Each structure stands twice: as C-alpha cells, then as structure tokens.
Amino acid sequence: MKSITIQGTKRESVGKKSTKALRDAELVPCVVYGGKEPLNFSTEEKSFKGLVYTPEAHTVSIEVDGQTIPAVLQDIQFHPITDRILHVDFYQLSDDKPVIMEVPVRITGRSRGVVAGGVLRQTFRKLKVKAIPANLPDEIVVDVTPLRIGNKFYVEALKNDSYTFMHPDNAVIVAVKMSRNAMKGGASAADDDDDEVEGTEGAAEATPEATSAE
C-alpha cells in the first residue's frame, strides 16, 4: 500500500486555548495512538491533501522531532460549516498487530443486467477491513460482469485469508436494479441468459438477502 509523509511538531500543551491558537494559525491538532503512550502533535492543514481528498487508501509516515512513526488514519473531524479539518486521530502500525482501515471499492466489468437495460447501484464506495499492515489491500475489486437484473453482490463473496471485512456477510456492495427503460421494454433476468456464467450467478444468488446497509 502507498504511504505519504506528514511532518509535524510535538505539542507540549493540549488545552482548549492551545488548540484554538493552532487552528487560528491554520494548523491541525493530531494524536497518534497505539504506542506506549499517545503522541500529540500539530501539522499544516495542507498536509492532508494527499490523504483525505483522494479516493485511494494510504498508510502514513509521521515525522515528529526526528521520530518516524508508521500509522493509519483512524478518525477525522471537520468543521460543520467550513469543512476545515479540526482534529485527526492516527493509529500506530506494528508488523504483527492487525489494524482497521477503509479501503476503496473498484468496480470492473460491465454487468449483463446493465446491458439488458438495468441500472447499477453501488452501496459502498469504501469497505472497512482488518489485517496486519503487510496484508492491507490498496483496493477491493468487484467484477460485476455476471450480475443480471435483480442480482446483488454481497460482502460474503469477497472473503479471503489475507484480511477480514468489518461488515455483515449479507451487506450489499452493488446491485442491478430494473430501470424504467427496461420495464418498458419488458427486460428481465431471463433476457440476459448465458449458460457460461450460471456457476457464478448461482453463487451470488445463494447469499441471503441483505437486511441492513451501512
């Protein structure tokens, strides 16, 4: 997984007055958990451009007073009106300690249901996964080619031995819905018949119907 570097300055005072002074200077108060004790530091708001305002997932190399700490973003607070970053939490990485982070979902292929006139609906743009740092994926790839109108792709279909999904097995990642044009044309799942994809299709439909969505 790609990593970006954030340079900061250790905070000696963490009170409200100190925090306000940092924000007035366009600096962001941050904290790193997961080590022997939390590390409080501040950095320029522009430091987060390549971490927050991107669809890609990154780990972070935090450089504070000559110390380099590998970490992942855990939480970020925005101002409700200006959307300025108010506070950021990081979690320190250890080679043998699993961490949780959000990973982007990338859709590939062209759904057979979409070809037949349906509409692809994506529920999750990112998925939370848990893994040791070496096994964290850059992205989660979902091939929607076999999906026909009425079919759904579930988290369960992505299970693997490298990382664990922090979502229910029956959470729907993407679904192919009937569109108005397809209804007018009388399209259905049967309109897209192809024996070559029956095995994949059957596996998708065997998963229980989703009862909740994030």
Image (tube, rainbow, N blue to C red):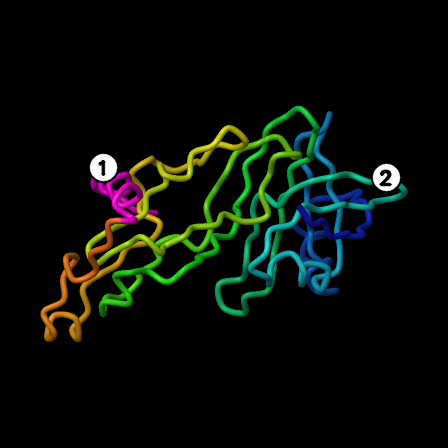
Nearer-the-camera pick, 51 or 113 = 113
> Residue at image x 63%, y 49%?
88
Relative image position of residue 141 (x, y in whole percent): 48, 50
13 shown above or below 21 = above
In the rendered structure, which amino acid carries the disc numbered 2? Gln
- Above or below, 19 against 67 in this view is below
Q: Measured from the top left, where is residue 167 in percent x and y?
A: 38, 38
Magenta run includes residue 67? no
Whether the magenta-drawn stretch holds residue 202 is answered as yes
Q: Residue furthest right?
A: 66
Q: Please give the range of residues in magenta.
A: 196-214
Query: Where, by quadrant of the figure, is residue 162 drawn?
Result: top right
Q: Quadrant of residue 156?
A: top left
Pick whichever, 130 or 14, lies toward us.
130
Name the residue carrying label 1. Answer: 206
Q: Amino acid at mark 1?
A: Ala
Q: Tell me where residue 61 appears, x and y as whole percent.
A: 76, 45
Q: Earlier in the sequence, mark 2 or mark 1?
A: 2
- Residue beneath label 2, please? 67
Residue drawn at the location 59% of the way across and 61% of the way down: 54
Give 74 or 198, whichever is nearer the viewer: 198
Q: How far, Cα to Cα, is label 2 from label 1?
A: 51 Å
Residue at image location 35% in from the left, 58% down from the top: 122
Classify residue 112 as left or right of residue 84: left
